[in-house]
């Protein structure tokens, strides 16, 4: 029998008015029971703000509240906010009882209009979740597979007619899979852009510029307050004990000179001073005790005592770099082929820093590890603690020479359909880099790192290659290779050992783009015949392919190769008839693991003024139904027959 739906004419008012919001979804869950979702009240507070209060109720005792709103002031700012708190009471059985969860989500977006203020700007987004909100409440693939949340909210001010700027704000990152949260609040930065402080204002001729006028000075300062914890402990008092706070400022100077016309020389110097509010003192407690887990006696243990102190860590470093560019040209011999250009960019740099671990600077101290003198090993430790900038130590005396060369190859050609010249990157980049540490006691030359990338097949396929080559000799002892402080070429006829290589091939294109490349133009549509050719049904499908190959040298000296990643993903919709279509929100196949990756399949029916859809997510063992009015002026009318099923229940 045909499906009969009610229809009517409803007066539409141009003014916003308060009113009841009827449930958008009727749901049933084996875990929470029968429930109503998204019912509540709409309040147009003013011409700048509207507010929506929604609720969720399940008959087994779960409930939730979801206030949200939008605000806007023309030519000034606009934004939106959404807070979702749920009290979920999951029933396992009559004997086991209940498990309660309290997931919370806070989302806020604020934007300042362009041109609202010439020097000041405030805006950003906040996206915070606690207690496994995504895994507990989300049902679509894109939200469920998003394992990382980030927030940034900043105030910036550019001082008029000056090189100085100030910014203050907060940042947040959260991994929903592990519930780890890192919160920085506040974060204050003050900076001065590069300025030629010694430049003469009365200089008339640029060629008479003195060497010291090329010196550029840069200054920056930062202050941070940071904590790392689990999302369930984010608003607990004990998290205050884990706060990391501090400040630093940096002054740098550099200049650039041309030598022999084509070689650019750049010397630079940096001074950094970081302020700590805590220091640590480590000492050995000589008490002997028996460890029942390891089943042995422990002769003392190291105690760390953190104290509130205000101290400064001061460091300096110096560097000198040189670079140039070389070009090789191959002229074309055909009308369409204009030529090939090879660009070579060699560079070398030297950096020096004094030995800050020496007793002269007093940045390090020592502690014993065993109460028995014959087994005692004295260890060095860093005296400063709780840096929000990740400072856990300063290095020994360092004098490094960095060497590298980058290559780029381009071709210029002319198309037959026009007279314009076009460029094609045959090789977007191929670089080789290494470092030589003058003060190292052994293995002064680091392994060579080779990397390259390019695009082929009209730019739809991206190739990336990286490799590590070790120049030091290796000796196999009892089936295990050991590096020797001797270059390989001094004993053998080969300069390097192959250590590791990675090749990545990725591509993303729609079926329509692939058909256009093959010369299959889209067929005409007329009347009830939607498509002339069957391949036109799949034109809006998006395909993505990714394969990563890896090879490395094992400790035994044998080379091994394997496929680390090999996946293909499809998104799109397939119109079966003018009224029916299948949607693929996310479906993929892992060729290496031989399994389907998180598919989400849907079916949609156009009911003229109404729409019906069904979505199935096998990985979550869940499905949803929905029927309602199409988006438009009558969207406020709904027949919310939306059933959500999850858990062990099937169809």
Image (cartoon, grey):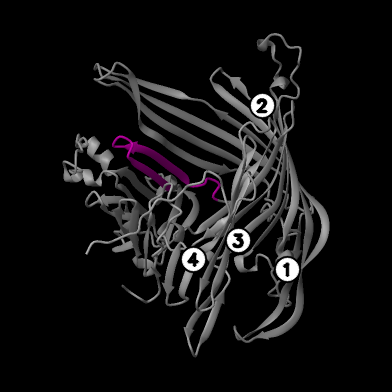
Q: Nearer the viewer, mark 2 or mark 1?
A: 1
> In the rendering, at what x and y percent does residue 47 appear?
63, 44
In terms of image quadrants, where is residue 40?
bottom right
Q: Mark 2 points at which residue?
A: 255
Location of residue 400 with respect to 341 vertically, above or below = below
Answer yes or no: do the residues labelled 4 and 3 have beta carbons within 8 Å? no
Residue 39 visible (yes or no): yes
Q: Which mark is residue 37?
A: 4
Which residue is identified by label 1?
A: 237
> Which segment did they paint magenta?
443-468
Circle 4 SS class? strand
What residue appears at the point 39 percent right and 68 percent down from the top-left corner? 643
> Along the polypeptide, which appears first: circle 3 or circle 1?
3
According to the image, label 3 marks what residue?
181
Label 4 – label 3 distance at C-alpha? 29 Å
Please state which of residues 577 and 474 is positioned toward the viewer in this rendering.
577
């Amino acid at each position: 029998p045909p499906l009969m739906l009610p229809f009517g004419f409803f007066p539409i008012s141009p003014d916003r008015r308060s009113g009841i919001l009827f449930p958008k979804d009727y749901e049933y869950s084996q875990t929470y029971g029968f429930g109503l979702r998204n019912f509540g009240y709409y309040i147009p507070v003013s011409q700048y703000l509207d507010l929506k209060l929604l609720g969720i109720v399940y008959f087994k005792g779960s409930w939730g509240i979801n206030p949200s709103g939008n605000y806007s002031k023309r030519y000034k700012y606009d934004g939106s906010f959404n807070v979702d708190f749920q009290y979920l009471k999951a029933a396992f059985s009559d004997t086991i009882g209940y498990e309660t969860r309290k997931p919370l989500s806070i989302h806020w977006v604020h934007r300042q209009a362009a041109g609202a203020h010439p020097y000041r700007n405030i805006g950003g987004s906040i996206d915070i979740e606690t207690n496994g909100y995504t895994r507990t409440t989300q049902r679509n693939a894109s939200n469920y597979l998003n394992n990382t949340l980030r927030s940034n909210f900043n105030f910036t001010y550019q001082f008029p007619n000056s090189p100085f700027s100030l910014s203050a704000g907060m940042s947040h990152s959260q991994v929903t899979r592990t519930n780890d949260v890192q919160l920085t609040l506040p974060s204050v930065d003050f900076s001065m852009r590069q300025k030629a402080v010694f430049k003469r204002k009365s200089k008339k001729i640029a060629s008479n510029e003195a060497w010291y006028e090329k010196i550029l000075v840069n200054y920056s300062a930062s202050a941070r307050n940071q904590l790392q914890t689990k999302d369930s402990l984010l608003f607990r008092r004990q998290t205050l004990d884990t706060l990391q706070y501090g400040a630093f400022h940096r002054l740098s100077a550099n200049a650039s000179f041309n030598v022999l016309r084509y070689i650019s020389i750049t010397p630079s110097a940096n001074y950094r001073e970081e302020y700590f509010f805590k220091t640590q003192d480590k000492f050995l407690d000589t008490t002997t005790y028996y460890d029942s887990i390891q089943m042995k006696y422990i002769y003392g243990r190291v105690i760390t005592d953190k104290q509130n102190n205000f101290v400064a860590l001061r460091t300096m470093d110096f560097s000198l770099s040189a670079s140039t560019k070389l070009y090789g040209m191959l002229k074309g011999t055909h009308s369409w082929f204009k030529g090939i250009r090879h660009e070579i960019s060699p560079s070398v740099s030297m950096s020096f820093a004094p030995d800050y671990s020496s007793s002269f600077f007093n940045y390090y101290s020592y502690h014993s590890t065993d109460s028995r003198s014959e087994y005692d090993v004295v260890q060095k430790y860093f005296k400063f603690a709780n840096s929000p900038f990740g400072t856990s130590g300063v290095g020994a005396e360092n004098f490094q020479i960095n060497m590298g060369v980058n290559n780029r190859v381009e071709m210029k050609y002319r198309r037959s359909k026009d007279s314009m010249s076009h460029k094609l990157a045959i090789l977007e980049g191929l670089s080789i880099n290494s470092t030589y540490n003058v003060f190292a006691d052994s293995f002064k030359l680091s392994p060579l790192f080779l990397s390259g990338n390019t695009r082929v097949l009209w730019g739809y396929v991206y190739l990336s290659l990286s490799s590590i080559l070790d120049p030091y000799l290796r000796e196999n002892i009892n089936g295990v290779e050991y590096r020797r402080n001797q270059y390989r070429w001094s004993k053998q006829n080969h300069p390097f050992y192959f250590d590791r290589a990675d090749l990545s091939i990725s591509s993303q294109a729609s079926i329509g783009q692939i058909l256009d490349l093959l010369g299959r133009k889209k067929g005409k549509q007329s009347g009830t015949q939607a498509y002339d050719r069957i391949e036109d049904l799949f034109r809006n499908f998006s395909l993505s392919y990714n394969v990563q190959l890896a090879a490395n040298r094992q400790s035994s000296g044998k080379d091994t190769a394997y496929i680390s990643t090999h996946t293909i993903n499809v998104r799109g919709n397939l119109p079966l008839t003018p009224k029916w279509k299948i949607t693929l929100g996310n479906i993929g196949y892992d060729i290496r693991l031989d399994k389907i990756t998180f598919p989400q399949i849907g079916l949609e029916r156009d009911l003229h003024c109404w729409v019906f859809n069904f979505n199935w997510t096998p990985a979550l063992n869940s499905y949803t139904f929905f029927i309602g009015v199409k988006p438009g002026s009558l969207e406020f009318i709904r027949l919310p027959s939306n059933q959500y099923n999850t858990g062990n229940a099937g169809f």
